[in-house]
Image: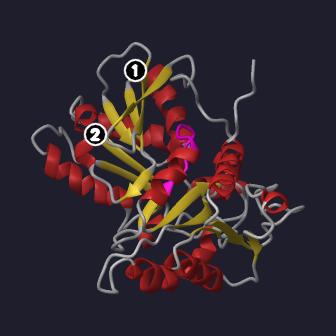
Amino acid sequence: MNRRERVAENLNRALHSLLDTDPSAYVLGEDIADPYGGAFKVTKGLSERHPERVITTPLSEAGITGVGAGLALAGNRPVVEMMFADFAALAFDQLLNFASKSVSMYGRRIPMSMVVRCPTGGNRGYGPTHSQSIQKHFIGIPELSLYETTPFHDNHDVFTAMLSREQPCVLFEDKVLYTRTLFTDGIVDDLFRYEWTGDDEPTAHVRSVDDTDPDWVVIAPGGLSERVIGAMRSLLLEEELNCELLVPSRLYPFDLAALLPVLSRTGRLCVVEDGTADGTWGEMLAQQAHTLLWKRLSRPVLVLSAEPSIIPTAAHLEREVVLQSETIHRAIAEATR
């Protein structure tokens, strides 16, 4: 039996394939060349195989992103790595005022195929400045698409989708998820299986093996998949609450209408996200759900976010701030009563 591929390995294979097949592809970032291969080893082996198009850069996130945008403007397809998503704040001006605007501000549409990779999230003990989930700060920028890695989607397909949009994309990659294996063959575990639903960029749909109608439908980005599935298991076994999970690859722009066949199966909807509340992806989805499902909903959409706090380094304090399986379980159980 072949060992299942880890998410970091799958990302590495996707980048190898991109560089092997596309001479216009570049990879740029800090310490990405061998033998180091990046902080999380996602770029391992790339520079040895493509030394002229895998470029280790100075410590300047704005500079790296600006060079990437310049390469894209000239017709290339660069992938830029932020060592940690937190540092993407230093590249915000390049994404907001140059890369995204360059698609349409020159009098005709310009293809700007580029990806900015951002290792994100907590539960690793990295502390306040290396553990944030900053997705909400990039939502709503015209011509900037947001994606997140999942344990369901093959990243070769994700990179193909992002670069085909011909606009800048940010790919958020949960750091804990790097170590997890991809689900395959529609199987999650003994209680749950998954299938695909939605539009041309499909969403993973996790449901119980007995296929009964759900008490709740949960929508979560890929980095939260494992924690939500853990909550689904305990809710089913301890509370007799059956939940289904939807995990998209693209976070923004997001059209909830494509998921109506699943959402319409219950009157309770929960959106889970890793960042802090206010102006978030979860609130955007809740607004769409209230518009589309108002007559079907039996209660307001439940949005679960991290605590409004810095992320501590100490593990026991970090767990109190970042959403955990037991937090999700407790919130859904209480909202059902």
Which residue type carries mark 1?
A: Glu
Q: Can I make out residue 274 in this image?
A: no
Region in magenta: 147-155
Instruction: Look at the picture and state if 90 lies above or below 124.
Output: below
- Camera-side mark, 1 or 2: 2
For the residue pair 241 and 250, the one nearer the viewer reads as 250
Provide the residue designation for mark 1.
240
For the residue pair 229 and 241, the one nearer the viewer reads as 229
SS for dot 2 = helix
Quadrant of image for the C terminus: top left
SS for dot 1 = loop
For the residue pair 83 and 11, the one nearer the viewer reads as 11
Image coordinates of residue 144 in percent, x first then y, are 41, 70
Q: Residue at x 60, y 59 (%)?
A: 121
Q: Is residue 160 left or right of residue 337?
A: right
Instruction: Look at the picture and state if 288 lies above or below 180.
Output: below
Colour basis: secondary structure
For the residue pair 91 and 330, the one nearer the viewer reads as 91
Image coordinates of residue 182 in percent, x first then y, are 62, 35
Image coordinates of residue 242 in percent, x first then y, are 38, 24
Provide the residue designation for mark 2.
259
Q: Residue at x 35, y 69 (%)?
A: 279
